[in-house]
Amino acid sequence: MSFDKNSFIQVLRKICGDDMITDVARLKVYETDGLTAKKQVPWIVVLPSTVSDVQRIVALCAEHDVPVVARGAGTGLSGGAMPHDHGVLLSLAKFNKILEVDERACVARIEPGVTNLAITKAVEHLGLYYAPDPSSQIACTIGGNVAENSGGVHCLKYGLTVHNVMGLKIVSPQGELYELGGEALDSAGFDLLALMHGSEGMLGIVVEVTVKLLVKPSVICVALVAFDSVTAAAGCVGEIIADGILPAGLEMMDQLAAEAAEAFVHAGYPTDAAALLLCELDGNVDEVQVQHQQLLSILDRCGATSVSTAWEEAERFRLWQGRKAAFPAVGRIAPDYYCMDGTIPRRELPEVLTAISELSEKFALPCANVFHAGDGNLHPLILYDANDSDQLQRAEAFGAQILALCIEKGGTITGEHGVGVEKIDQMCIQFRDAELEVFHEVKSSFDHQGILNPGKAVPTLSRCAEFGAMHVHVGEEKYSDLERF
Amino acid sequence: MQSIDGTDSLKEAVAKALQDSKPLWLRGGNSKSFYGNPCDADCTELDLRCHSGVIDYVPNELVLRVRAGTSLSEVLELLESEGQMLPFEPPNFGGASTIGGVIASGLSGPRRPYYGAVRDFVLGVSVLGGKGEVLSFGGQVMKNVAGYDVSRLMVGALGTLGIIMDVSLKVLPRRPEITLRVSELPDSISGLSAHARVESQHYVRVPKGTDVEGDVVDDDFWRQLAAHELPSLRAGNALWRISVPPSSTQYLDEASVVEWGGAVRWVADPEGNPHETLSAGHATLFRTNDCSERNRFQPLDAVVSRIHGNLKHGFDPQGIFNPGRMTWYAN
C-alpha cells in the first residue's frame, strides 16, 4: 500500500478514540466468523457507536483505498465477515439499541447490532414478534440478517429477511448516509431495498433497520412425526403442501441428526425413526383444528409410523430447541462438520437425499441431514476430522458434488447462508460469465472503488476460468456435463 | 393456451436496436401504456406477446414458471383451476395485461398489505439484457442468496433495465373468502385479506365464516377496484397515487379511495404538487390527461439517484430500453 500506515492510524484514532484495536492479540478475536476454516487477522478493528463516526471512518478508508469489512456478531457460515489483511474491520456491535417500537403500526426501528431474538423479546409483551428466526437467532444481528437475507424455520409461511424489512439506513462506500424504503409499503425508483438484502456487505453499510412485526397467532401446534424411511418423509412434505396446507414451519431431520439433537438437548425425539418431520400450524382456533385434522389424515396416508402433537408452549419450545440446536449437537459427535446450504425444488427431495447418502458411502464420511424441508433448503452436515488432511479433502469434494447436484436439479448453491468466501468457486458453476458481469456492474454502481468487502460473494471472471480449467483437468464427472462458459 | 418461444426474434430485435442505435419501446398488452413517463426518443415499438406460454407449473411446488408475454387472464384461470392464486393480486387493466407487464410495473393489488408485493413472490427471472444476451437470475426455489437479487430489481423497473423473458413466481393456495360492506372498520379482524374505503364506505374481505357484520358484496369488487373500473377512480384530469405510512394524515380526507390499510390513497386533481408536499412516502402521477408530463415519479435522494443512473448505465449501456419511461431525478 502506497500510503503512510501510521498517519492513517493516527487520523482513524482521532475518529475512534479507544474504540479501535490494533494489537495482534486482541485482533485475533476477529480472525474468523462462523466459517472457522477460513482465518485472517484484520489490520485494524474499529467499533464506532454513532452513525456519523461510521460515515467518517468509511470516507477516510475510501480516500485511502483501504478495504472495509462490516461485521455483526460474526455468526455467518460462509465467511462473509472474514477480515481483509490490509483492511479495516468495522464492527457494528455497539449499535445495539431498539430505537422505536410502534405498536399500532406493527413496526420497529432498530440498530443493526441488535440480535434477532432481542427484537422479539422486546415486543412480545405487546403480543407481537419478528418472524424470521435463523437458528443462530440468539447471537446473530439484524444487520447481518439483512446482509445474508437470513431465513429460518418459519420462512415457508412468513418469508425471509427481505420480506420482513421495510426500510434501511445505509452508509455508502463514500461515507454518505441515505435511506431506502420506510414505513410506506413501496417506494419510488428501482427496488434497491430488495437488492441490498443478501448483498453480503458489498454494497453499503447498514446502520438502521425498520422491521415489520407480526401479531402472534392465537393457536400454535407442532406435530412431531416419525417415518421409517427418509424418502417417505421427503415425499410426505410434498403431500402436505399439495393438500393446500401452508405450515408455519416444516422441518426434517434424519436419524443421525435426530440422535445427536436428542442426546444434546433431550427434546423427546424418537431415535429409532429413520426420519422425523416437525410441522407447525398456526392461526385462529378453527383454522388450526381443521388443518390439524387434515394433516393427520395426510400423515396416515404417507405411512408415518408415529405422530404426537404439542399444543403447549413449553412442549413446542422443547421440540424446536432440538431442531435449532441440531448443528452444535452434530458438532458433539464429530471433531468437525462441513455445513452445506443447497436448495432444490421440493419434488427433488427424495432423489437428492438418496444421492447424498450414496455420496456419503462413496467418500466414506458420515452425513447428517437437518433442514428446511418445506422450502427445499438442504443442510447436509458432512462429518470429518480437520486434522486428517485426507478427510478434509474428501469433505470438500463431497460438498462440491452436493452443490453441483443441487444446480443440476434446478436449485442453487446457497439458500440462506450466503456465498462469502466459502462458495465463491461454485458461483462459477451456477452463473455464466455474462451474468457474473452483471453482478460486477451492480457492485460498481454502488461501490466503484471496490472498497466494501472485496473478494467476497462474486468471483472474478479470471478466477472462474482457473477454477474451470482445474476441474476439467481433474475430470470431475459431475461438472463436465454442466455448461459453464 | 398458446406456447411460443420468441427468444430468437426478440434477440434479433435487440441486436438491431444496438446496431442502429435506435431504442425500443417495450409493450405487452398495452394495458398500462398510460403509466410512467412518455418516450423521450425516437423508438421502435416491440410487442413482447410473441414470447408466451406456461413453461412449468406443478401445483405441489407452489411455483409457476411462465414466459413474460403470457396473458395475465390466462394465468389466473390456470391457477384458479388448481385452487391457487397470485398472492399479490395484480391489477388487470382492461383485462389485457401480460405477466411481463405485471412484473415490470411492480403494481400489486388489494391483497398487498396482508400477503406481500409482486417482488415478494418473484423467485427468478431471465432477462434479455442491454448487450443482447439472455441472462438468468434466481431460480424456481423458495430461497436463493447466490449473487445479487437481480430478479427483484427487475420488478417495478418498467423495462428500463432489460426485457423480462421468463419469470418464476411463488403461488399460494386460495381459501374461501367473502367480501362485506361495513359501516366502519372494526378494530381488528383476523384473516383480513383486503380493505378499502371508497368514498365513505368501507369494504373488507375475510375468510368465510369470520364473524363480521356487514352487507355481502360480490367478490369481483376487488378486481374492479384494482383495475380502476370504479367511478371514484375515473374522475378528474390527474389521478395521483399517494403511498405513505398508514398512520400518515396527509391526503386522507381528499382521497376518493383509500386502500392497503391506509398505506395507499388515490387523489384526483389535488391542490399543489404532492411531490413537494409529502413528508414521508412517495407520490406518483398515475394517470393524467396531459400525455407529455415527464415528472410523474417522486424525485429521489441524491445518492439513490446516482445509484439509479449507474445501474441503468451498467445494465443498458447504450440506452436502448424504454428511454424516459422511468426517471430518477435527484431532489
Image (cartoon, grey):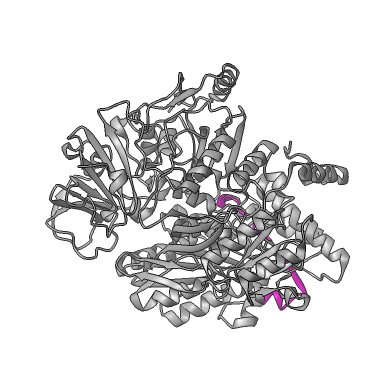
| Figure quadrant of residue A293 | bottom left
Q: Position of residue A359 (x, y in %)?
A: 76, 57
A338 horizontally vs A275: left or right: right
- Give the residue displayed 43% in from the left and 66% down from the top: A296
Q: Nearer the viewer, residue A266 or A16?
A: A16
- Asked if residue A416 is among those painted magenta in the image, a careful observer would answer no
B153 horizontally vs A485: left or right: left
Q: Nearer the viewer, residue B262 or A335?
A: B262
Q: Position of residue B311 (x, y in %)?
A: 55, 40
Count of numbered circles on the image: 0
Q: Position of residue B312 (x, y in %)?
A: 53, 36
A203 horizontally vs A393: left or right: left
Up/down of A166 relative to A337, above or below? above
**Quadrant including the N terminus of chain B:** top left
| Figure quadrant of residue B96 | top left
- Give the residue displayed 32% in from the left and 39% down from the top: B91
Residue range (magenta): A329-347
Up/down of B168 relative to A13, above or below? above
- Give the residue displayed 23% in from the left and 57% down from the top: B249
Q: Nearer the viewer, residue A402 or A109?
A: A109
Q: Nearer the viewer, residue A143 or B85?
A: A143
- Asked if residue A341 is among those painted magenta in the image, a careful observer would answer yes
**Quadrant including the C terminus of chain B:** top left
Q: Position of residue B29 (x, y in %)?
A: 38, 27
Would you say residue A39 is visible in this rendering? no
A324 horizontally vs B185: left or right: right
Would you say residue A464 is visible in this rendering? yes
Up/down of A336 relative to B214, above or below? below
